Amino acid sequence: MPGFLDFDFILGRVIPYLDRGLLMSLKLIIPATLIGGFIGIVLGVLRVFGSTAIRKSADAFVAVIRGVPLTVQLMILYFGLPSIPWVKIYLAPYTAALLGFIICTASYQSEYVRGALLSIQQGQIKAAQALGMSRWQTILFVIVPQAVRRALPGCGNEIIYLVKYSSLAYLVTCIELTGEAKVLVSRTFRPTEVYFAAACYYLIIVTAATWLLGKLEKKLEIPGAVRQK
Amino acid sequence: MHTPASETPILRAEHFSKYLGGRKILDDCSICMHPGDVKVLIGPSGAGKSTFLQCINCLLEPDEGEIWLGEKQINVKNSKELCYLRQHVGMIFQDFNLFDHLCAQDNVALALRKVRGMSKQDALKRAKEELARVGLADRASLFPAQLSGGQKQRVAIARALAMDPTVLLLDEPTSALDPELVGEVLTVIRDLASHGMPMIMVTHQMEFARAVATEILFMEQGQVIEHGAPDDLLAPGTISRTQDFCTRLCDLCSGDTGRIEE
């Protein structure tokens, strides 16, 4: 019987499994962050500046997505859609998981963006209008660039969440980091080493993401507007 | 209200009324600008001066009234015509309203590129010229948060001038400034006036108003109740509502207002 925390076992069997899972996790997290972030900004803008009909539908969409657990959403996407008569959409596990994450993260991001958009002074909007800029030019070139900067800390938080809820993908048989860990545990009956190793993987991803977000925040910082230390 | 003149006025705002929250904020106000006119709106707070100014370029849509730019009446419901009006009527705000995420030259260049359709290079060249005109050539790449209040307001003036406005509206351009920074902004405005830039200005700097205005309009409770050349309205011994207001204003600030940097 090998001892507790057997390094040969970890290096020889756990790491190769988890590396494969990590790759799949990144394939989910990175596109979901980028595409979801972009859709989140668009959704946030529509929820603040869209016509009444667009605003109401975007609000309703976000309310539904935020009101249903992600697990249930993933189940509907993967197991539910094929059984709807006339629709019968069959999604591959990866597609279902990615789609679910994009929709979910976009909805949450839109909320941060919405708050930031509302915080931009009316004065700057008036100034842009007084220069003859159209409504959408004002939104695109004056309001959004500032709002994105203000929303960044909140959006970063949502990205960190996304890293962790990506572990739900194994529920729709998209085997990522957590999925691989589960498979390995069921073969070796050594949950301690495997799950501790998986936890370390997540910690590393989150640390890297935090570092990158800090870099981005610094890069986008407006000179002179540094908060007092 | 109309001064007799042979040429067509460059801008006419006629019979403006505006209701806000059921109250009549602006009651049948008119103003008519000829080339070189500098008209100053004064009056107690809440008189409707800023409202009137913001109605002229439709930042607040007047409920009644007509606006003419030269020979052309502007239909403010039409967004193309509204944009045309705003391009020709520059505006300076009390609290500058610079775009916080852009440096001084980009603040000036943004509308040149997006509204006028100029190339980035041409727009930046023009922006630098305008900044030089207000004495900020060496501050072109600084951001609003790195500028003093007076410098911010001068950038705002450069931004408005870059659009080659027919008329400039100034809404208390020095009210948000520290006293020692008022002079540099007034110098720029006086310089514009002496070069014949038509302006409508709301201000409490009475000495300054007297020095640059071709006409003073005194507003109270949403109406223009007196108007005339500063010398007529403010001459010692004249009994006018304007004179009375100014005397009280000057008593309050003990004659400290409107000093101009030479």
Image (spheres, helix red, strand yellow):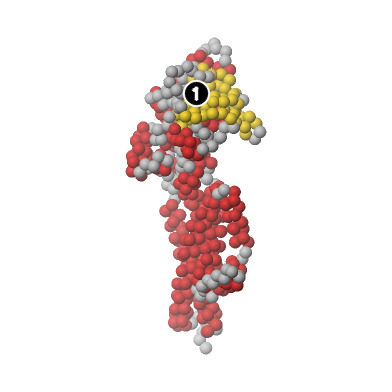
- The location of residue B130, given as percent across then percent down, is 37, 35
Q: Residue at x 44, y 50 (%)?
A: A221
- The location of residue A96, given as percent across then percent down, is 53, 69
Q: Is residue B262 visible?
A: no
Residue B102 vs residue B71, the one in the foreground: B71
- The location of residue B147, given as percent across then percent down, is 43, 39
Q: Is residue B57 visible?
A: yes
Residue B59 vs residue A221, the one in the foreground: B59
Q: Which residue is mark 1?
A: B32
Q: Quadrant of residue B90?
A: top left
Horizontal side of residue A3 vs A63, given as left or right? left
Q: Residue furthest bottom?
A: A1
- The location of residue A181, given as percent across then percent down, is 52, 77
Horizontal side of residue A165 vs B34, given as left or right? right
Q: Residue at x 61, y 70 (%)?
A: A85
- Crowd band around label 1 with a 10 angstrom C-alpha radius: few (<14), some (14–19), many (20+): some
What residue type is disc 1 on? Cys
Position of B69 relative to A40 (above/below)? above
Q: Quadrant of residue B137?
A: top left
Residue B156 vs residue A42, the one in the foreground: A42
Mark 1 lies on a secondary structure that is: strand
Task: Output the chain of dot 1.
Answer: B
Position of B99 relative to B188 (above/below)? below
Position of A64 relative to B223 (above/below)? below
Q: Residue at x 63, y 29 (%)?
A: B24
